[in-house]
Image (cartoon, rainbow, N blue to C red):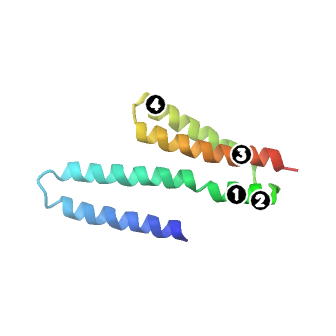
Amino acid sequence: MAFFYVEFLLIKILVILLLYSFRRTNSMWLIATSIDVIFSIALFINAFLFIPQAIKLYQTKDAKDLSKITFVGFCLTQLSAIAYGFLHRDYILTIGYLLALATCGTVTFLIFKYKS
């Protein structure tokens, strides 16, 4: 529930910044900067969304309801995003997805460890 509130708050901030930016002479710079900031925050939120799953897996030591294929797919997607960010020198994207890969990779490892 808290993450939905954060996403709603980020959208609200973006709308306010967009409306404000049209009053300024350099409006495109403000729009681009606002989107960059919100995207950066969203990347870090994405990375931290896997932590509750990892904690629950570690505490219960039960992964019967989780799909190995899904989490391996998440990891592969994150690896491709890291490669893309690195090749295009987008370091925010690269760092954000490295964090996501670390947390998702932890969940994936625990799934393979505890899957019966």
- Find out whether the residues at labels 2 and 3 contact each other: C-beta distance under 8 Å: no
| Distance between the alpha carbons at the discs numbered 3 and 1 | 12 Å
**Where is mark 4, residue-wise?**
86
Which of the two discs, 2 and 3, labels the residue nearer the N terminus? Answer: 2
Is disc 4 in contact with disc 3, using a CB cutoff of under 8 Å?
A: no
Residue drawn where x is 33% and y is 65% of the image: 13
Name the one closer to the observer, 87 or 37: 37
- Does 18 appear above or below 72? below
Mark nearer the N terminus (4 vs 3):
4
In the rendered structure, which amino acid carries the disc numbered 3?
Thr
State the CA–CA distance, disc 2 to disc 4. Answer: 35 Å
Given this view, does label 3 or label 1 mark the residue nearer the observer? 1
Residue 12 point in image, percent of width and height: 35, 68
Tell me the quarter of the image containing the N terminus.
bottom right
The amino acid type of the residue labelled 1 equals: Ile
Q: Secondary structure at mark 4?
A: helix
Residue 55 circle label: 1
Residue that label 2 marks: 59
Indicate which label's residue lies in the foreground, 2 or 3: 2
Which of the two discs, 4 and 1, labels the residue nearer the N terminus?
A: 1
- Tag 2 secondary structure: helix
How far across and down, in percent of the image, does residue 100 sit? 56, 46
Specify the farthest residue to the left: 25
Crowd band around label 1 with a 10 angstrom C-alpha radius: few (<14), some (14–19), many (20+): some
* Residue designated by label 3: 108
Q: Residues within 10 Å of mark 2 (few under 14, many from 20)?
A: few
**Residue 46 % position (x, y):** 53, 53
Asked if 7 appears above or below 29 in the picture, the reply is below
| In the depicted structure, whether residue 48 falls above or below residue 75 | below
